[in-house]
Amino acid sequence: MTGVDLHTQARLLDANDPLAQFRHRFAIPPHIDGSAAVYLCGHSLGLAPLAARTLVNEELDDWNQLAVLGHHVSRRPWIDYAQQLRPALAQLMGAHPGEVVAMNSLTVNLHLLMASFYRPQARRRCIVVEQGAFSSDRHAVISQIELHGLSAADALIEVAPAAGTDLVDESAIEQLLAERGAEIALVLWPGVQFRTGQAFDVGRIARAAQAAGAACGIDLAHAAGNMPLQLHDDGADFAVWCSYKYLNGGPGAIGGAFVHERHRRAALPGLAGWWGHDAGSRFRMEPGFVPAADAAAWQVSNPPILATAPLLASLRVFEAAGLPALRAKSLQMTGLLLEQIDTRFQSQLQCITPRQAARRGCQLSLRLRAGREAGRRVFEDLGASGVVADWREPDILRIAPVPLYNRYAELAVFCDVLEAALRRHA
């Protein structure tokens, strides 16, 4: 809308937004002055679906009234609770229902899946990760390496961004696999990089890994509920995710995992627990482990019902909204912000998130050209003005307009507050 100021443009977009109704299904946190905060931190913790309280209270009521019988006769029987999440998760992940399961937390799931898919033998012993991988992933990877009697110095390969950039192109992974594929047992890569917001071509990475004889796992912490995913077709061996960011499952929410249907737990080594046992014979309590026929075999314990109910509430909102519509709004919101960065803030901010639509999700990562100290003051000013964002050392401001609950008008407010803060400090 050339020649139209941002506030006017935002009002027009909000008035014609087919997803506007969904904002009213979430609790918007208040600023100190009582007004609604401009919440741009869904990449760290999604907002609470209002229905979450209802579902949790219903589970508490069933516990009060039914006790142990609630496993079978509650309104949502607890014995099959995780099964209820599978259809919606499968749709979001681009997977078959039997390929996904809600369970545990992200890093626990990562350990469980690496126990099956990281099997170093002789020369093929290395795990490939990004340089600057999220610390929990790196800790998990190194501990798995050490459990096999190896050292990170010998078995960890970190792929760095291209010189002078913050980004890693898939071609760098392909080149590494072409040159050193015989040494590599597992490629573990993010769907979206947590610091830069760069989205990766999961299928391209999976094909390159498997052509080299390596397994491929994907960390979808910043991609689940954010990006369109086609895990089955892309062919990665496994994936893991948390549910408290874009999936709005609540702090510490139950995570999830994907295992491609070509894999069967019965044919793989790994760690076992009773909830991964075939459901038809689980309660016979026999000594032998008979794994479930699909991804459910990697479960170890029954799901925490009170921690799973909020995710069920959120997934119902995703089903009503539809990911294609959410993705279209997300790209329009980030595109609008990129226009402002180019026209209003070009001399003060550098967006390190890729500009191409397919290479970004909701998150934009902005580097303050004035440096860390000025950047921190700008970040603190945003918070004092009611804008909830996120800071990553040494100089990155992360923001994420989430299409389920953010309005275009909030982007205009953010830009005004940011401009004032930059004028004071940068």
Image (tube, rainbow, N blue to C red):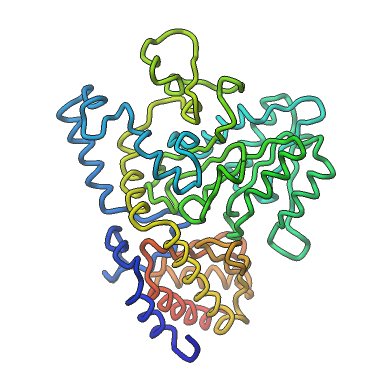
**Residue furthest bottom in the image:** 3
- Residue 249 or 19: which is nearer the viewer? 19
Q: From the viewer's perspective, is residue 392 above or below residue 155? A: below
- Residue 145 or 317: which is nearer the viewer? 317
Which percent across, then down, holds residue 248? 38, 51
Q: From the viewer's perspective, is residue 32 above or below residue 188? A: below
- Residue 286 or 310: which is nearer the viewer? 286
Which percent across, then down, holds residue 312? 33, 43
Q: Report the number of discs.
A: 0
Residue shown at 31%/47% (left/top)? 313
Residue shown at 63%/82% (left/top)? 347
Residue shown at 55%/35% (left/top)? 259
Residue shown at 50%/27% (left/top)? 298
Q: From the viewer's perspective, is residue 408 above or below residue 89? A: below
Which percent across, then down, holds residue 348? 60, 79
Which quadrant, please, contains the C terminus? bottom right
Would residue 339 appear left or right of 160 to someone viewing this image?
A: left
Quarter residue 260 falls in: top right
**Residue furthest left in the image:** 65
Would residue 116 appear left or right of 83 to someone viewing this image?
A: right
- Residue 289 or 145: which is nearer the viewer? 289
**Residue furthest top in the image:** 287
Quarter residue 279 falls in: top left
